[in-house]
Image: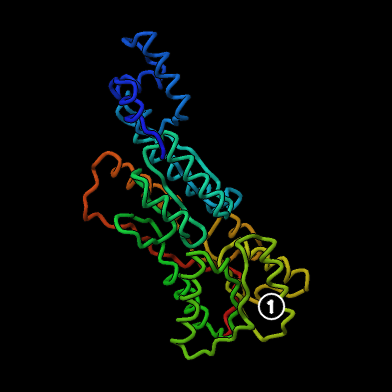
Amino acid sequence: MKVTITDIAKIANVSVATVSRVINNKSKGVSEQTRTRLLKLIEEYNFEPNAVARGLVTKKSKIIGLLIQDIANPFYPRLAKGVEEEANLRGYNIILCDGNNSEEKEVNYLDFLNKHYVAGIIYNNFNNIGDKILNIIVNNSIPLVFIDSKIDIPGIRCVYVENEKAIYELVSYLISIGHRKIGFITGPMDSYSTNERFKGYIKVLEDNQIPIDYDLIVEGDYTIPKGYETMGILLDRKTEMTVVVCCNDLMAIGAMEMLEERNIKVPDEMSIVGFDNIDMSRIVRPKLTTVSQPSYEMGRAAAKMLINIIENKSKKNDASVVFLPELVIRDSVKKLN
């Protein structure tokens, strides 16, 4: 069983505040004999100070953990900037952790943040929540807010975009200008955002009486190389299509690279759309039609929500924050009608 600061205080027959002073090297008023005895007990019981123990002297931690999935993906720096700027305004600092789309790394980072003096955590989970991560979240009392994800855990608040609605509106636009053979490059199918976007794609086809052709669907991983690879797979299937919807801009850029290699002109011979509206989407040629995610604003909203919880300024009936998507029409789509 894990030893707590209270346990150490009881064994030594001193107050918790005395143990905290020794842990934080603020031993004024603590005798050298008591200090030495406490240090020996801490070593003997392999005691690891957590956020509560370290915070007893200051009464408040000013550090927030931010766990994201891929710092190389341009979507995340804007999100992190929003978190950092809002936190800075409120007097908080950030520990940034890159989960790298790995459940093992996410578990390790969540464990690390729970043990190291953080007042709360902003968590962007990539995969659907597994039992290991669920147990960490449920069994720890540190405030936590999910970002870019909607999680049905009692008491947990989220900041996210309506992914299903976003893809529905995007594909509805494509149908309205004459496209009916619509390819779809997903993200990993065990991720929240992919599942929501895929549901939107299926629903809009059904609502418009367009048969679902699974030869037009291929799984990606939100990277440029995978967009390039999966675009090649779709082309090699020889299935008729006029447009390909990619679940993020990076894969759309990779898909455009493959089309250029195959001498297929965008948008004259094949239209391409993305998702996120990263800066590169307006720099590539042709400029990419996409869905804008307000990542910076989402970051600020998540930081504000978390700090209000930490400082007991949040109300029980405060809801999660939902951002509406915005379609950004540029040059990578051809009107067929």
Q: How many marks overall?
A: 1
Left or right: residue 283 versus residue 129 is right
Label 1 crowd bin: few (<14), some (14–19), many (20+), radius 10 Å: many
Residue 337 horizontal/vertical position (percent):
55, 86
Q: Quadrant of residue 331?
A: bottom right
From the viewer's side, name the closer residue of 187 and 208.
187
Q: Quadrant of residue 283?
A: bottom right
Residue 260 horizontal/vertical position (percent):
75, 69
From the viewer's side, name the closer residue of 330 and 258.
258
Residue at 73%, 73% in the rendered image: 232
Residue designated by label 1: 234
- Position of residue 267 relative to residue 134, above or below, is below
**Image quadrant where one finds the N terminus:** top left
Residue at 32%, 57% in the rendered image: 320
Q: Quadrant of residue 101?
A: bottom right
Left or right: residue 10 versus residue 186 is left
Colouring used for the render: rainbow
Residue 190 horizontal/vertical position (percent):
53, 66
From the viewer's side, name the closer residue of 335 and 22.
22
Left or right: residue 11 versus residue 170 is left
Residue at 72%, 65% in the rendered image: 257
Residue at 48%, 60% in the rendered image: 130
From the viewer's side, name the closer residue of 2 and 324.
2
> In this view of the protein, can residue 228 be seen by the observer?
yes
* Helix, strand or loop for disc 1: helix
> In this view of the protein, can residue 330 be seen by the observer?
no
Residue type for callout 1:
Leu
- Position of residue 40 relative to residue 67, above or below, is above
- Position of residue 183 relative to residue 20, above or below, is below
